[in-house]
Amino acid sequence: MKLKILLVEDDPSSITIYEKILKKSGFTVETMMFGKEGLELMAKIKEGKKEKPDLVLLDLILPDMNGIKILKEAKKEKETKNIPFIILTNYIGKETKEMGEKFGAEYVVKTDVTPRELIKKINKHLKNKSR
């Protein structure tokens, strides 16, 4: 069974690039462009109505909210707290980075990582799961 990555990203060209990279690497990808969708998914997982993703790639700057809100919500619920998160953003802010790390998310600046390096980071988080 393929592992599922949730990509929360609002930039259409970034979505296209990341979906292609992830699918080529053998993952199933679900994409959401708004933070509200991410929060709704976390609520549905908590209620047992949706399957949780194996990992979340989370942009911070979304049209309707800061992605940290999704991370905080996921980490406070027992059904979603163990989902690994990688914050994938071009926003370089010390406070935001510290906040993400406080909740156990790896912080990756998009312009500082190649597609191959990103896949390595994802695989590191998923090393105990089978594909």
Image (cartoon, rainbow, N blue to C red):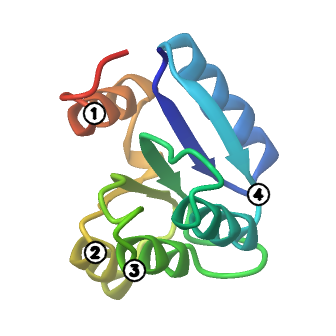
Q: Earlier in the sequence, mark 4 or mark 3?
A: 4
Say if mark 4 contacts mark 3, CB within 8 Å. Answer: no
Label 2 amino acid? Phe
Q: Is residue 59 above or below residue 118?
A: below
- Report the side of 62 relative to 117 (left or right): right
Structural distance between the alpha carbons of marks 2 and 1: 18 Å
Q: Position of residue 30 (x, y in %)?
A: 67, 39
Mark found first going from the N terminus, 2 or 1 = 2
According to the picture, the residue beneath numbered tag 2 turns out to be 103
Q: Name the residue under label 4.
A: 33
Q: Which of 50 and 89 is in front in this view?
A: 50
Name the amino acid type tagged 3: Gly
Circle nearer the viewer, 1 or 3: 1
Q: Distance between the residues labelled 3 and 2?
A: 16 Å
- Label 3 sits on residue: 93
User: Which callout, 1 or 3, points at the residue further toward the start of the chain?
Assistant: 3
Q: What residue type is labelled 4?
A: Met
Residue at 41% x, 62% y: name it: 80
Disc 4 to disc 3, C-alpha distance: 21 Å
Per the image, label 1 sits on a secondary structure element best described as loop
Q: Residue 126 carries which label?
A: 1
Amino acid type at image mark 1? Leu
Q: Mark 3: few, some, or many residues within 10 Å (few <14, many ≥20)?
A: few
**Residue 126, image x, y percentages:** 27, 33
